[in-house]
Image (cartoon, rainbow, N blue to C red):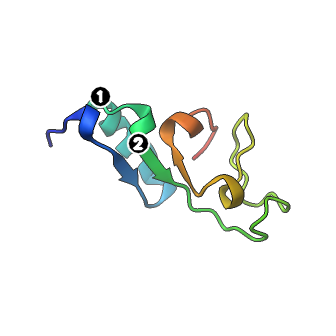
Amino acid sequence: MTITPEKTFAVVVGPPIMYKFVIAELLKKNLPERQIILSLERHMKCGMGKCGHCQIDHPKNYYCCKDGPTFTYEEVKAAKKL
């Protein structure tokens, strides 16, 4: 697949195990991290960030329910596990 990195965005939706493989391929094609959009599906119990169930293990303590569920790879690449 040939892409034009400056004109391309990728939206990644699926099981988390898939993310690392898809992201690696997109980065090999020189797609900027800010143009890789991830939909981080988490079970969101409260929807307000109070219960912590959907918290992403990231230095900025993102919550899928209030900060997402979509993030750029640039925003969440520091997460221990996506």
Residue type (three-letter) at the residue carrying disc 1:
Asn
User: Residue lying farthest bottom?
Assistant: 45
Q: Are marks 2 and 1 in contact (CB under 8 Å)?
A: no
Task: Describe residue 70's horizontal placement relative to residue 44 as left or right.
Answer: left
Place residue 5 in its image quadrant.
top left
Give me the disc on residue 79: none
The residue drawn where x is 73% and y is 52% is 55
Of residues 1 and 17, which is closer to you in this image? 1
The residue drawn where x is 58% and y is 39% is 76
Give me the disc on residue 30: 1
Place residue 22 in its image quadrant.
top left
Q: Is residue 29 above or below residue 47?
A: above
Place residue 81 in its image quadrant.
top right
Give me the disc on residue 36: 2
User: Residue lying farthest right?
Assistant: 50
Of residues 19 and 34, which is closer to you in this image? 34
Task: Describe residue 58's horizontal placement relative to residue 4 as left or right.
Answer: right
Residue type (three-letter) at the residue carrying disc 2:
Ile
